[in-house]
Image: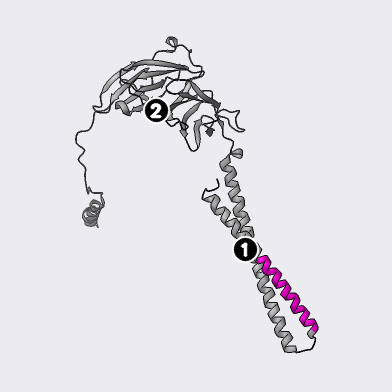
Amino acid sequence: FLTYIVHDAGAKLEQAKPRQTCWLDLGPLPKDMVQSKDMVACTALCPRQRLIASFALVRRNVCFWSLDTFTKVGEVLIPSASELSGGAAKVVAGRSMAYYSTSEGALFVSSGTTAVILVYNCRKFRLADKIVHPQVPSCLSVVRDPEANEDLSSWLLIGDVEGNVTVVNCKTYEPIGKYWAHGPGLEEGSTGGNLISSVSLWPKLGLISTGDDGRVVLGDHRFFQIKDYKSSEAIKATDLVLNLVKEVLQKNEQLRKARDLLAEATRRAVSMANSHTARGRADGANAKAQVERLRDDKDELKHKVMTCESAARARAKMAVELLSGRNL
């Protein structure tokens, strides 16, 4: 028994261990990009300048790292609240950054403690402009203008601590639209705060934002308001299709019942005619009248079947056209 424990079981355990079957030669690993004496609060990729920007969690410095050498090539110190117009924040939000692709590269930076968005030049690593926002920004995002044909036309989406979503032109910094998206007063049962944690755009759907109130809100990027699903054209079209499909099913059920009645009337007419032939002339007048009535009922049911069949085909064709998008 001891021999089994020591030798046989040990050999089986050794065979059960995972073994290397292949390997990859990674070569020399790139250098670590380390935020000196601090943690990283947020980052932004600047692909046109081949840079990564990192914002420290405690200190007010933004570092620029080269994607080619993985070394720090620039650093800026974010001005304090007393140095900026716009005043200090009453509510501290998370730090955020967003990149706008230009020849010089524009990096939008929000410290989360002031109502000012700083715009930095990604080539010269210096402050290029300021955007004074009514509230303290809590998140930033740069998206392409869904209504424009030019590739360079872009929007800066700003979510703030008061639950507002603001859209600003990336070139002129002119406000395009604004609406209140998050807050306890917007929906019954919402008990969270107003701060917006993220905002983005899906052109086919709209502006999408999440907040401390625990809700994901869909906004209309043309009218800048929370979408009303009850009046949405897409929802109306969907309801129309569903009602039409329901009507098709009802017409098909009517057609099935009419065919069943026609089959029953045909069976009774044939049975009555056979019975009349078997009895000869006895009660011939009454039997003949019953056969004629059954034939009339049969003809009427035939017409009803044809009508139901035509209606079912028409509803089915309309449903197919709507579902394929031809009439939407």
Q: Nearer the viewer, residue 96 or 11?
A: 96
Say which label, 2 or 1, has the lower sequence index. Answer: 2
From this viewpoint, is residue 311 visible?
yes
Q: Which residue appears at 58% of the width and 45% of the height?
A: 237
Q: Which residue appears at 40% of the width and 21% of the height?
A: 109
Secondary structure beneath label 1: helix
From this viewpoint, is residue 163 visible?
no
For label 1, count other residues whose C-alpha is less than 10 Å away and answer few (under 14), some (14-19) or many (20+). Answer: some
Q: Nearer the viewer, residue 53 or 152?
A: 152
Q: Is residue 209 above or below residue 77?
A: below
Q: Is residue 254 left or right of residue 58?
A: right
Count of numbered labels shown in the rendering: 2
* Residue 294 included in the magenta stretch of the image: yes
Determine the main secondary structure of the stretch shown in magenta. Answer: helix
Rendered location of residue 53, percent (x, y): 34, 24
- Indicate the amino acid at tag 1: Glu
Rendered location of residue 233, percent (x, y): 58, 40
- Indicate the amino acid at tag 2: Leu
Q: Is residue 136 left or right of residue 57?
A: right
Q: Is residue 16 above or below residue 176?
A: below
Rendered location of residue 171, percent (x, y): 42, 22
What's drawn in magenta, residue-wise?
Answer: 285-305
Q: Which residue appears at 23% of the width and 51% of the height?
A: 14
3D distance between C-alphas at marks 2 and 1: 56 Å
Q: Quadrant of the C terminus?
A: top right
Rendered location of residue 298, percent (x, y): 70, 72
Secondary structure beneath label 2: loop
In the picture of the structure, the residue carrying the numbered disc 1 is: 309
Q: Is residue 256 left or right of residue 159?
A: right
Q: Is residue 25 above or below residue 117?
A: below
In the picture of the structure, the residue carrying the numbered disc 2 is: 152
